[in-house]
Image (tube, rainbow, N blue to C red):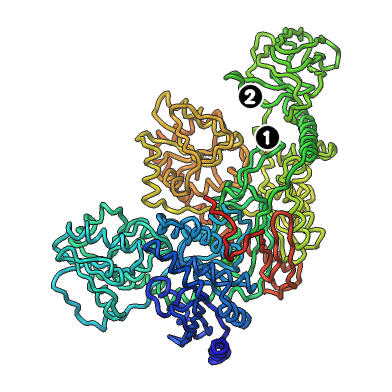
Amino acid sequence: MAEALRRAKAAAELRPGREIILAVNDYDVARSVGGGASRIQQIYSRLASDYRTIVLAFSNDDTLTSEWRDEVFYCRVPKTEAHIAEESRINAMFHISANDTTASQFVAENKMMVALFRHLSRIAARVVFEHPYMAPLAEVVETKFVYAAHNWEFNLEEKLLQYHPERTEILNVAAQVEDFCATQSELIVSVAESDLTGIVRSSIARGALSGPGSIVIRNGGEDPVPRERFGKIAFARPYIVFLGSAHPPNIDAARFVVDRLAPELPAVDFRFIGSVCDCLSSASANVILHGVVDREEKSRLLYGAGIALNPMMEGSGSNVKLAEYLGHGVPIVSTPFGARGFDAQMRDFVTVVPLEEFAASCRTLIDRPVDAAKRDAAIAYFHEALSLTYLARQFGESLKDLGRPKKRILAVLTRYNDPPLGGAEVHMLEFLKALSRDGRYHVDVVTPDISRITDQSRFLSTFGEGGTTSVPTGLERVHWARFPLDARSKADEDRTYTMAAHNWDAQLLLDEARIRYLSRGSTHVGLGWGWHDPESWSGRPVRWASYQAMLMTREAGLVVVHGTAPRRTHLRFVNENDDLILQVTVSGSFNVKVDASRSQAVKIVASTERDPIDRDPRPRAYAVDFVQIGDQVIDLVENPWTFDNPTEAIDFYYGSQNIRADFGANLGASRGPFCDSLRLSVEAVIGDYDLVVTHNPVLKHVSDTIAAANAAGVPSVLVPHLHLDDDYYHFPDILDATRNATLSLLSPSSLCRLFNAHGVHNVRHLPAGAAFAEPDREAVAEFERLYDSAVPFFVVLGRKNPTKNYRSIIDAVGVLNKRHRVNVVMIGADEDGVPVQQSWVRYLGWKSTGVAAAALKSCLGLVTMSRSESFGIIVAEAWLAGAPVVANRNCAAFCDLIEDEVNGLLADDAELPQVLERLIAEKDLAGQLVAAGRREVEKYRWSAVGAEFVAICDTVIAERAGTTAGRGAEPPAVRRIEPTGGGIARSEAGMDVAPARPPLRRPVASPLDA
């Protein structure tokens, strides 16, 4: 061991002036072949000009050896006798090795390995675990590390070892070490988006509450031998090539070629390169096995090929062979699974088809060969994006970036889920992406551990567990942590209920003020204030009445009220002068008649006791299912007391904010979420940050964060997503947070003018952005499967929630269908749970962005009739997709974007059928609207809006510091915090949560979480 330490020290000192990377892997990389080993060898050898790399691994024998190879120092440590014995035992059971997980169980007991790791990790600038299986070393010798994930290991082991006798025990180990790396590393570097999301998602499903930043650096190929070196490459017959190691998924793919494809194409040869040949036999004359060849011969064979095959159906990581094929300009036929992990540009050079279409695709490429220009374009793309030289630079830059000082931003979000669960979450995710791309910021995202938010009785909420959803990945400089919600006692729930009831009492006063305002000079006969929104009882509309409810009678004559009182209730009917007309006591079903022939209005005052077990905070005395005033039967569904003009609504509610303020109303205090561990942790560390970013103060922890930032003297940027034409957003705690933040970013722009007019100047307009990705073939096919109809349709995108006013669209298309045949397609989460039963409506539920994009590309138009939005992302996305837009003319956010009759059509509920009919009847109208919309949309692309947001953060930080923003500073001293339910470690990078975890050493502590 002393000799090994001497050699390692000599290796470190041999190339002075360069930082050391310690790369740790479970198997001997230098003496192995295959995609993972090649990636490690090639990347570190290409980093030699900037780093001295030491690769520490187990040896394949019982000796301690070391060597220099291609500018990388390899150190191999022998396994213990117990380790070797366990390998022999477990591998005797099954034809696929379990050496990787066995290494995890024994590495921490190998004294020589631990001693070398302890020494080398201390002198290394960066420690990288290649694969997760040596991660127990980081528990024995506490150190920071980068996790280089070559696969989603748990998923790969689950498939490969499906029939292993000790499958459960092996998978337990794989899950533990992979979860450890996914939560405790400084950075996750994955080879494919699908693997990265799988790693993070599965760790969260097993209880992880935090994670580091992550990035995808794809698998690439080594630079090919230049084509010019070979001159003319001649073979007797045209041939198709397959390249692969003896990895089980490769073997299955190669057998498909030998058994099924080669017999179908006897006129061409099939040449196999790599150790996969050891598992094949030449079953037919046109199958040629070359085996493992040197770099020059491999390039010669690839340059000469007419087609390269990638018929992969399983596996993990991204396909190295695809990069090799592209580097030689060979046309590729691949399965969709085989092409995973590569971007859309790569797919320009690949024919992606299912296995059953391989033969036909190969025939097409044989009959119509790809021209030289396209081959050259593929080679150019390889050098720009997939060569190991390029990828090594990416990896090296990411390692350097970890050591650069950065400004620190604490982002306190309402929730952090993948996919985002609402427009506000999309909005903030795009801002996080912009900050991460910029490179000068480290962002710590903290949030309650929640997913779905379900409102109850308007001022209460329940929250789905965050562990049911993953988090966004691919954000290199963004770490995340979720905090468990408080365990709530009955006393806690009682306080919340009391606050919600208090908010409802204030709401009724505000409703009364609104209806008094709107009914000035009105002769309307019907319901006044004091009535709750309609409900459906066995298909009949019913309204609950509060303890004081008004009827607008206008001296119309006899009033008939039929309803139900759940408890004994005394009713007093008084006129507008509070003169008693009638009093009666009711219980159960009742029918009351009142003479209102001399009354402009009748107020019903109810006296009853609240049911102590009723947890609905609304003041409810009785429910009515029939009201008649004079000869007019009142429509209990209709609500005539709404603002037609959003500006008028905003002015009224803002001017009436004292009603709730004087009453002590507070939305966050009743709605929550209640998460003391988050609040206390934020208060403890907030002073170490340069800026706090938060949003959506309709939730309690956001207002708490603004207060904590002000107390600590840390500047804050708030994105409140205000819908000020909705009274819901005029609670004192929401408006106070908006006024008390250092800067509040508002949309639509009219809100800035409103606040300015009332002396509030910490506001600035920043619109939301938009992005649109063309749907791929799979997404289009999925939408066509879901919407299996030739009937043209309008599309409705977004949460299925009454606030989105989707029923007005359903009704309007129902009117249209008296003259046309048109459907409605609705895509979005089902938040209200109300069945949609109309024959012309297809409700698809939540679907991927690709399916939504396919719907936008093929619809008659996007229709959005929400009455209140803080921004109109969906409008801009529709423009990018080429879909005309119809929106609610009474929504200020839509009016900010849409110029009626120019880039869209505006309509109220009554106008909607006629406006939609124009898109059917006027053939050129849609194209004109879309063309104008696309001209408008450029300034709303997320790239532009995100860059503006970063500039705003720069300015706010600079104004606080008095220096140029974003140039970095020395981080504060390390400190650790352990909040309830999960720990936060305060590091140089910022906030990292470290939830309780089992040890990684033998024996395995927990059973596999199936």
952 or 480: which is nearer to us?
A: 480
Give the mark count.
Answer: 2
Q: Which mark is residue 535?
A: 2
Contact between marks 1 and 2 (CB within 8 A): the answer is no
- Locate residue 619: give its quadrant: top right
Can I make out residue 435 in this image? no
Instruction: Establish if 297 lies above or below 465.
Output: below
Residue shown at the point (30%, 60%) measured from the top left: 253
Where is 900 relative to 623, above or below?
Answer: below
Label 1 vs 2, first from the N-terminus: 1
Which mark identifies residue 784? none
**936 shown above or below 965:** above
Front one among 313 and 164: 164
Q: Is residue 280 left or right of residue 320?
A: left
Q: Residues within 10 Å of mark 1 (few under 14, many from 20)?
A: few
| Residue 456, numbered circle | 1
Give the image location of residue 333, x and y in percent: 29, 60
Residue 382 located left or right of residue 178: left
| Amino acid type at image mark 2 | Glu
| The N terminus lies in quadrant | bottom right
**Number of other residues with Cα within 10 Å of mark 2, as a class: few under 14, some 14 to 19, many 20 or more:** some
The three-letter code of the residue at mark 1 reads Gln
Q: Residue at x 50, y 74 (%)?
A: 25
On the image, the x and y values in percent for residue 94 come to 39, 61
Real-space Cα distance between discs 1 and 2? 14 Å
Q: Position of residue 449 (x, y in %)?
A: 65, 50
Numbered disc 2: secondary structure: strand
At horizontal 72% and vertical 24% (from top left) the residue drawn is 531
Q: Nearer the viewer, mark 1 or mark 2?
A: 1
